[in-house]
């Protein structure tokens, strides 16, 4: 992340014209909210929200022996990843710590990766250092990325890009969105059905205008993006995940494909295989906090004697449950659902209990699932 | 009755040695949706510039400081049931606490409505 003046994104003026409050995030000025976080959050769960996530890094990886090259840096089984399919994966360091989490898509003869905005430059350096010379990495700096999320996202988007309704969760394809070329996948970061739309930066305003003209759609800021992903139990890199945290501790074992768990051959495999066999000492869990007062990132998990045994990594207020929620790391012995947990924050003790995540059910359109 | 303002965006409405304290409309708009307010109980001694209350928005927790020293006579119980009163009526029904001033001279460093408006415009 740069410490200097923030850069602007292709939709900067568009956001300001729609009343957004802009704040520095990941080295960019980004819209934190328009009409208000709670209203935007509820609108997304009820209808469709338009998010500008152009700060995220969009990468193309192409070249010879590509699957083998990429499997050396990702713990995914790419032999199972068919054309037009996405997978959630991780960049790992040699100690098994998470360098970033990402989406990888097989697109014909190359892979398309979407990585976090705050970590993209480090990710690119990490990938360049570890990928063979015969593999090219292209950072799509001239692209914007929009997300349309919510139960009515499909109605709004199918009007402009017919055919997207046939996509199922974690698949994507090339579409014409009102004559603009777009790569559209059925994916997102809210727990809702929805789409992510990659377009050339110069088309961003016209596409955003078209989407916002649909009656189901309102613009949604980063504030609601954070509260939506928290309700959905989805970790946020730099908060719930970092280089000191392994995927097993983070309860992201699903991101490591079965063949890779057995065979290894990715960074940190020895540590991760050891944790798979013996358990990790801590685990990321969901916490329902009693009362009304939110508990924030940095709050301590304490045992009966008051010793610090863990920490809260994300915390806030759930607009859907109208209650405070958190996620954090607790010792494995305290990770079972229903376990009472004490938290210390701002000089006060809070009572909480471990609850399964997501806090609010996911509503993805999975292949073969009943409507 | 005179209303004064602080650089930390509290307002204090003073009548004799009694006063009512809250956060300004500017402050509530900056904080966004307020989901929790912790106000001091009657009898609490507060010190000018010291932490007196907590206000939590969806995004973050913020301290509310006492504009002057004194003894709290009442916390606004309505905020417990409906913290969004701070959003809808920051400078009226969304008041935080009432207190008895211990030293009226402490008011001299606070801003008038006009000075506060200039201060906010410069933010």
Image (tube, rainbow, N blue to C red):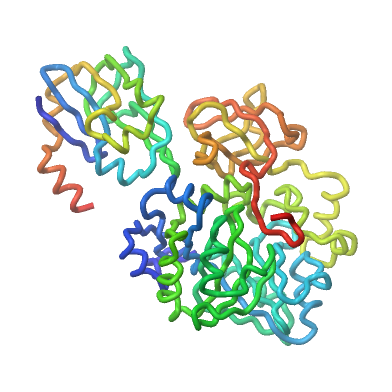
Q: Compared with residue A204, is residue A258 higher up or lower down, i.e. above or below?
A: above
Residue A140 appears in the rendering: yes
Query: At 42% from the left edge and 47% from the top edge, which residue is drawn?
Result: A39
Residue A266 % position (x, y): 80, 66
- Quadrant location of residue A259? bottom right
Q: Is residue A274 left or right of residue B85?
A: right
Residue A164 % position (x, y): 61, 71
Query: At 78% from the left edge and 66% from the top edge, which residue is drawn?
Result: A76
Q: Which residue in the rendered view is the most extreme toward the right?
A: A262
Q: Is residue A134 left or right of residue A38?
A: right
- Quadrant location of residue A165? bottom right
Q: Report the quarter where the C terminus of chain A lies.
A: bottom right
Q: Compared with residue A39, is residue A87 higher up or lower down, i.e. above or below?
A: below
Query: At 14% from the left edge and 37% from the top edge, which residue is drawn?
Result: B111
Q: Which residue in the rendered view is the most extreme toward the top?
A: B43
Residue A142 appears in the rendering: no
Residue A215 % position (x, y): 43, 61
Q: Nearer the viewer, residue A213 or A266?
A: A213
Q: Compared with residue A4, is residue B12 higher up or lower down, i.e. above or below?
A: above
Q: Is residue A338 left or right of residue A296?
A: right
Q: Nearer the viewer, residue B8 or B95?
A: B95
How many dots with numbers? 0
Residue B20 % position (x, y): 21, 24
Q: Nearer the viewer, residue B22 or A35?
A: A35
- Quadrant location of residue B21? top left
């Amino acid at each position: 992340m740069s410490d200097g003046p923030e850069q602007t994104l292709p939709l900067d003026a568009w956001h300001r014209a729609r009343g957004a409050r802009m704040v520095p995030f990941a080295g960019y000025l980004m819209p934190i909210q328009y009409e208000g976080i709670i209203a935007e959050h509820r609108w997304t769960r009820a209808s469709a929200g338009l998010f500008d996530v152009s700060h995220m890094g969009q990468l193309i990886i192409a070249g010879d022996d590509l699957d083998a090259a990429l499997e050396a840096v990702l713990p995914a089984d790419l032999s199972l990843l068919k054309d037009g399919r996405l997978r959630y994966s991780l960049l790992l360091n040699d100690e098994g710590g998470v360098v970033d989490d990402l989406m990888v898509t097989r697109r014909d003869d190359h892979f398309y990766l979407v990585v976090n905005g705050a970590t993209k430059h480090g990710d690119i350096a990490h990938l360049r250092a570890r990928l063979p010379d015969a593999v090219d990495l292209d950072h799509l700096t001239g692209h914007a990325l929009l997300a349309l999320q919510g139960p009515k996202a499909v109605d709004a988007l199918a009007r402009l890009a017919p055919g997207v309704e046939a996509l199922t969760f974690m698949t994507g394809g090339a579409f014409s969105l009102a004559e603009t070329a777009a790569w559209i996948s059925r994916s997102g970061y809210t727990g809702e059905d929805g789409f992510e739309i990659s377009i050339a930066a110069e088309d961003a305003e016209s596409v955003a205008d078209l989407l916002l003209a649909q009656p189901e759609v309102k613009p949604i800021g980063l504030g609601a993006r954070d509260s939506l992903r928290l309700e959905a139990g989805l970790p946020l890199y730099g908060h719930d995940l970092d280089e000191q945290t392994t995927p097993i501790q983070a309860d992201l074992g699903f991101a490591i494909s079965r063949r890779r768990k057995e065979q290894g051959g990715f960074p940190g495999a020895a540590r991760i295989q050891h944790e798979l066999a013996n358990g990790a000492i801590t685990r990321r869990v969901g916490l329902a906090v009693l009362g009304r007062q939110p508990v924030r990132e940095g709050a301590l998990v304490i045992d009966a004697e008051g010793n610090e045994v863990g920490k809260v990594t994300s915390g806030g207020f759930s607009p859907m449950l109208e209650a405070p929620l958190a996620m954090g790391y607790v010792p494995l012995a305290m990770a079972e659902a229903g376990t009472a947990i004490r938290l210390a924050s701002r000089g006060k003790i809070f009572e909480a209990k471990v609850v399964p995540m997501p806090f609010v059910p996911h509503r993805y359109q999975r292949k073969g699932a009943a409507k | 009755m005179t209303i004064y303002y602080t650089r930390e965006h509290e307002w204090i409405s003073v009548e004799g040695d009694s006063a009512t304290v809250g956060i300004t409309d500017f402050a509530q708009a900056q904080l966004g949706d307020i989901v929790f307010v912790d106000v001091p109980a009657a009898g609490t001694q507060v010190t000018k510039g010291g932490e007196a209350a907590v206000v939590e928005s969806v995004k973050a927790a913020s301290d509310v400081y006492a504009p002057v020293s004194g003894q709290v006579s009442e916390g606004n119980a309505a905020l417990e049931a409906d913290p969004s009163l701070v959003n809808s009526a920051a400078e009226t029904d969304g008041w935080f606490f009432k207190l008895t001033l211990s030293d009226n001279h402490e008011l001299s460093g606070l801003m008038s409505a006009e000075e506060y408006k200039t201060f906010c415009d410069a933010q």
